[in-house]
Image: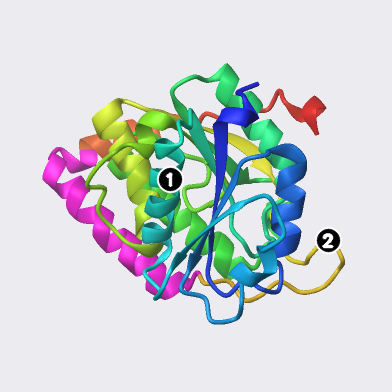
Amino acid sequence: MADPRSTAVVIPALNEALRIRDVVEQTLVHCPWVIVVDDGSDDGTGDCLRDLPVTVLRHERRRGKGSALRTGFAAALAQGASGALTIDGDGQHDPADLPRLLAAAARHPQHIVIGARLRHRAAAPAHRRMANAFGDWGVAWAAGFRIADTQSGQRYYPAPVLALGDVPGEDFVFEAQLLISAARQLGMRCVSVPVETRYRGQDGGPLRRSHFRPLRDLYRITSHVVGQVIAQGDVWREYARVRAQAPLIETLIDDAR
């Protein structure tokens, strides 16, 4: 397993007072190094964590998820991180899956590891499944290989990805572009680890409504990546090449759950 002591868990958070403390406490069970980036919250998100052994960085105004991740990655690199795990602050990701991502990272050096929402996928809302499938299609085309879940925010990034400069895009576009930039600039591919997405908290209570808006954000992601696909040339030949591949999915790690 990759060493959790040298791996920072970066949690971007915007108005997550409902669940952020639970998320961080569960994360600390598995990884001792947690960086929360409070992206201009006005609900006391950062105050919920005052007595926990974590680093809380704050943007005075909302700058978007991409900017929050950049801030967290820079802090992790400045402190010597060998890589970073990311999860969202709303409770939809299970921190118990983080060791599985680290184990996959150890088996697949120089890969981005994605916690792909493949388990019980039929339980997800239909519009979310359709949006995810459409996004997967576009990002894979631009990256040059198929990826099982391009919109999951539960990931492991090796340090060279954290150090990539001038990665364009904001909000959810940034996460899509990271996969593309890592592929083009570093020759780095992705391996997916099947996980479940939680639609209720561990206590059975509701999660806050997702910040992801399918129509708005998929339009932003798609318009962002289509231009890159066209710029590469041989559009349909590249599409056929990518579609002929199968995504790399790590399935031999269930004993770590």
Which residue is identified by label 2? Answer: 202
Going 49% across and 53% down the picture, which residue do you hit? 151
Residue 226 placed where, x, y %?
23, 54
Left or right of 243, for residue 254: right
Q: Is residue 250 visible?
A: no
In this orientation, does residue 96 appear?
yes
Above or below, 82 relative to 28: above
- Which residue is the extreme one toward the bottom? 42
Q: CA distance from mark 1 to mark 2?
A: 30 Å
Residue 54 rendering spot, x and y as whole percentages: 63, 51
- The residue located at (25%, 53%) in the rendering is 168
Q: Quadrant of residue 140?
A: top left
Q: Is residue 237 left or right of residue 88?
A: left
| Front-most of residues 233 and 101 | 101
What residue does disc 1 label?
A: 75
Q: Position of residue 136 (x, y in %)?
A: 44, 49
Q: In front here: 192 or 241? A: 192
Residue stretch in magenta: 212-236
Residue drawn at x 36%, y 48% is 139
Amino acid type for the residue under numbered disc 1: Ala
Q: Is residue 19 above or below residue 4?
A: below
Relative to the observer, which residue lies in front, 227 or 157?
157
Q: Quadrant of the C terminus?
A: top right
Please identify the quarter of the rendering in which residue 100 is found.
top right
Residue at point 40% right, 38% down?
78
For the N terminus, the image quarter is top right
Mark 1: which secondary structure? helix
Identify which amino acid the numbered label 2 is placed on.
Gln
Indicate the position of residue 205 as horizontal and vertical percent values.
Answer: 82, 73
